[in-house]
Each structure stands twice: as C-alpha cells, then as structure tokens.
Image (spheres, rainbow, N blue to C red):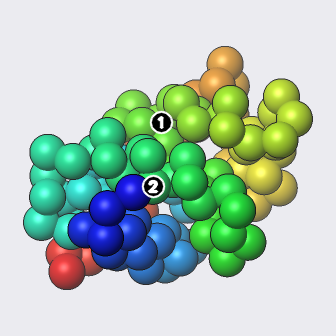
C-alpha cells in the first residue's frame, strides 16, 4: 500500500475514533469531512483494514442508508450487529433502525 493511502487511512481512523457510543456515521460522511467527498469507497477500505486495530470502532460506520455493508469483515456472522445493539442501536434486516436518529455527522477537517 502506498504512503498516501496510509496517511488517508489514518485520517479516516481519527474521525472514526470520534464517533460517540450509540451513534453511527457513513463512509460518505467521513469522506466529506476529510474534504474528499468522492472517496467513500476508500473510506470503506480503511474500515475493512481497521479490524486489526482495537481502538477504532469500525462497527459504527455504515453505508448512506444505514445498511451494515461491512459486517462480513467482522468475526462471526452477527458481531457488527451485536456491537451496535450493545450500544443501544437497534438493527433489523442488516439496517440501523431510526438511522437519522442515530446518525452522527463528523466535523469538517
């Protein structure tokens, strides 16, 4: 992986660490906060790579409509959902219930 990617990933992780417990944000919202609105997919790659880092709450990052699209990157079949539910975020059919209520907007960097 290139150095630029490593730096981008670290910037993504800085934002992800700020997501409050019981809240979620989207790949696109993180990309916009970084000033790279068209790089939501790259944010997804960063989240996929985050599972080796214990201090990044990757389970709190979902797609733009609240779907748990990254769940297959977690150990076990429902770990992402279980982690969210343990924080009070209801999930039904792999989607955050009341997504707007739980959505956290990261600050523009």
- Whole-percent x and y of residue 41? 32, 40
Residue at image location 55% in from the left, 47% down from the top = 48
Does residue 99 show up? Answer: no
Give SS at disc 2: helix
Which label sits on residue 84? none
Q: Dot 2: within a 10 Å radius of its alpha carbon, few (fewer than 14), some, or many (20 or more) residues?
A: many
* Residue placed most toward the observer, 8 or 35: 8
Residue at image location 82% in from the left, 33% down from the top = 78
Residue 12 picture quarter: bottom left
Q: Earlier in the sequence, mark 1 or mark 2?
A: 2
Picture layout, residue 56 above or below residue 1: below
Residue at image location 14% in from the left, 52% down from the top = 37
**What residue sits right under mark 2 in the picture?**
46
- Whole-percent x and y of residue 71? 66, 35
Give SS at disc 1: loop
Quadrant showing the N terminus: bottom left
Q: How many marks?
A: 2
**What residue sits right under mark 1 in the picture?**
66
Residue at image location 44% in from the left, 46% down from the top = 45
């Amino acid at each position: 992986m290139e150095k630029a990617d490593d730096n981008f990933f670290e910037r993504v992780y800085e934002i992800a660490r700020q997501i409050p417990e019981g809240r979620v944000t989207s790949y696109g919202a993180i990309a916009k906060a970084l000033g790279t609105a068209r790089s939501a997919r790259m944010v997804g790659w960063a989240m996929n790579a985050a599972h080796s880092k214990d201090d990044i709450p990757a389970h709190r990052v979902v797609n733009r409509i609240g779907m748990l699209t990254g769940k297959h990157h977690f150990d076990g079949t429902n770990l992402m959902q279980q982690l969210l539910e343990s924080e009070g975020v209801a999930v039904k059919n792999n989607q955050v219930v009341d997504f707007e209520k739980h959505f956290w907007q990261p600050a523009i960097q």
